[in-house]
Image (spheres, rainbow, N blue to C red):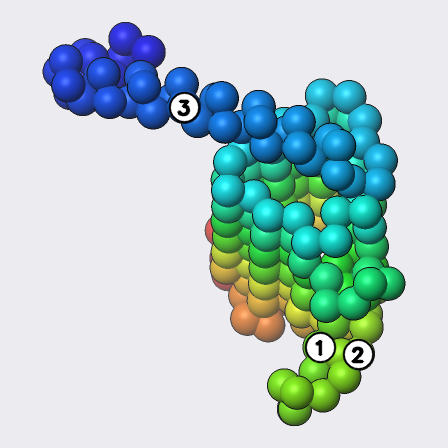
């Protein structure tokens, strides 16, 4: 915490020290509430403040899942479900729709401000929703600000979706996609670690 005092002086440091303390307490409270509200939950869950769960009894969470600030989980229908595997990370500001059913397998990373849809309304926003289940496979990484539209169906194992991409169709295993609409820009060798940064075409 001393870095804040070094960077901005006493009042700056005091503000950020208190802010971090309040944030930690609120996050512990939110995590405790979520643990008692969802359908099932594993060990090591961490949920930051400001996150909202709609229909929590439709949500199952694995071990060591981390969820950032201001994340929204919602379903338009009671039949929607969300299953999170182990070691899933969902960062600040993500909006996750699980109306059509959503499964995040182990080690999936959802970066900040990602939007995921599992239903749509065609050309009439007041029509009945059309459901579209989605599975995000083991080790996949959805980059910051990406949008995953309904009818994608599957995001493959250890695939990477570049920041800001709009995904309109299935993404294969070990594939990097980027752009609007997202298209394949490279394949990841199966013995290569998932890249830590991806740029568009």
Q: Quadrant of residue 118?
A: bottom right
> Residue beneath label 3, please?
22
In the picture, residue 6 is in which quadrant? top left
Percent coordinates x, y for residue 186 in the rendering: 65, 54
Q: Nearer the viewer, residue 53 or 118?
A: 53
Tell me the distance, in whole angstroms, between the alpha carbons under discs 3 and 1.
Answer: 39 Å
User: Does residue 181 appear left or right of residue 4 in this picture?
Assistant: right
* CB within 8 Å, label 2 to label 3: no
Where is residue 105? Give x, y as percent. 81, 42
Residue visible at 50% across and 28% down? 26
Badge 2, how many Cα within 10 Å: few under 14, some, many 20+?
A: some
Q: Return the disc, 2 or 1, that comes first in the chain's sequence.
A: 1
Question: Measured along the vertical axis of the image, is residue 98 above or below residue 105?
Answer: below
Residue at image x 86%, y 63%? Answer: 79
Front one among 45 and 33: 33
> Can you tell which mark lies on residue 120?
1
Q: Residue 198 in the image: x percent, y percent?
A: 53, 47
Contact (Cβ within 8 Å) of mark 3 with mark 1: no
């Amino acid at each position: 915490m001393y870095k804040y005092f070094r960077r901005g002086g006493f009042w700056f440091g005091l503000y950020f020290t208190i802010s971090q303390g309040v944030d930690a307490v609120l996050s512990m409270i939110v995590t405790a509430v979520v643990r008692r509200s969802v359908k099932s939950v594993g060990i090591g869950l961490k949920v930051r403040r400001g996150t909202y769960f709609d229909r929590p009894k439709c949500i199952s969470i694995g071990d060591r899942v981390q969820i950032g600030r201001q994340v929204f989980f919602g379903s338009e229908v009671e039949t929607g479900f969300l299953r999170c595997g182990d070691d899933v990370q969902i960062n600040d500001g993500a909006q996750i729709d699980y109306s059509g059913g959503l499964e995040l397998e182990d080690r999936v990373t959802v970066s900040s401000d990602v939007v995921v849809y599992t239903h749509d309304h065609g050309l009439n926003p007041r029509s009945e929703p059309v459901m579209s289940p989605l599975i995000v496979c083991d080790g996949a990484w959805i980059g910051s600000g990406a949008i995953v539209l309904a009818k994608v169906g599957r995001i493959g194992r250890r695939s990477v979706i570049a920041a800001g991409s709009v995904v309109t169709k299935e993404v294969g295993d070990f594939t990097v996609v980027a752009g609007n609409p997202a298209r394949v820009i490279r394949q990841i060798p199966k013995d290569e670690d998932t890249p830590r940064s991806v740029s568009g075409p």
